[in-house]
């Protein structure tokens, strides 16, 4: 008789569990949507910097741009996943909103930091591409002659 009694007993899910699931789903939805939007914006606008930096090497610029976006996704979605777990119990809608806003705020700070890091990387790549194509800043006016070890070198010659 005991197995039948256990089978018919309904499972009671605490109200807090429903709020936690809602908070997690809302957090994931907002965070991943923000990450995708920022990544697409960076990819679209960063392409101009990379095309200029790689001096007409379109395929190389597109490949680097794609690799930077993949790294951006890995870093940010990894951070979102790692910060998902919450140790406090949630009982009200207000607590759900506060929790999601706090977590999304942290994600936005990380996205902003990654954005500025990408700008720095793009600028370094663009600057190095320009420097390679520029002539030396000043032509040398004097040269040093290389002489044999036994011959003295006159100054000012």
Image (tube, rainbow, N blue to C red):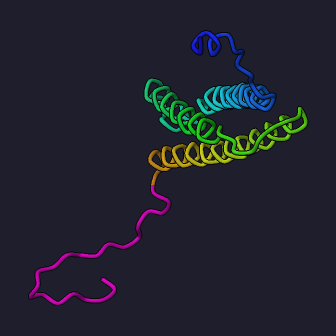
x then y, percent, for residue 141: 41, 70
Residue 79 in the image: above or below residue 60 = below
Q: Quadrant of residue 34?
A: top right
Residue at the image point whose x is 67% and y is 45% from the top:
110
Residue at the image point whose x is 61% and y is 31% from the top:
48
Residue 137 in the image: above or below residue 129 = below
Residue 59 in the image: above or below residue 85 = above
Camera-nearest residue between 13 and 128: 13
- In reply to whether residue 134 is colored magenta, the answer given is no
Camera-nearest residue between 67 and 121: 67
Most distant residue in the front direction? 1
Residue 4 in the image: above or below residue 42 = above
Most distant residue in the left direction? 150
Residue at the image point whose x is 54% and y is 43% from the top:
126
x then y, percent, for residue 101: 82, 39
Q: How many marks?
A: 0
Camera-nearest residue between 55 and 134: 55
Q: Which residues are magenta?
A: 136-157
x then y, percent, for residue 43: 61, 28
Camera-nearest residue between 85 and 52: 85
Q: Which SS does the magenta portion mostly show?
A: loop
């Amino acid at each position: 008789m005991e197995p039948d009694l256990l089978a018919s007993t309904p499972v009671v899910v605490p109200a807090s569990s429903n709020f936690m699931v809602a908070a997690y789903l809302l957090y994931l939805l907002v965070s991943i949507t923000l990450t995708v939007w920022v990544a697409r914006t960076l990819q679209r606008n960063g392409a101009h910097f990379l095309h200029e930096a790689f001096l007409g090497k379109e395929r190389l610029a597109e490949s680097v741009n794609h690799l930077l976006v993949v790294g951006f996704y890995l870093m940010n979605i990894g951070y979102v996943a790692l910060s998902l777990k919450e140790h406090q119990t949630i009982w009200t809608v207000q607590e759900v909103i506060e929790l999601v806003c706090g977590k999304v705020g942290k994600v936005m700070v990380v996205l902003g930091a990654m954005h500025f890091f990408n700008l720095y990387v793009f600028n370094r790549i663009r600057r190095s591409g320009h420097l390679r194509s520029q002539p030396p800043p000043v032509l040398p006016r004097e040269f040093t002659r290389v002489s044999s070890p036994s011959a003295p070198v006159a100054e000012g010659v």
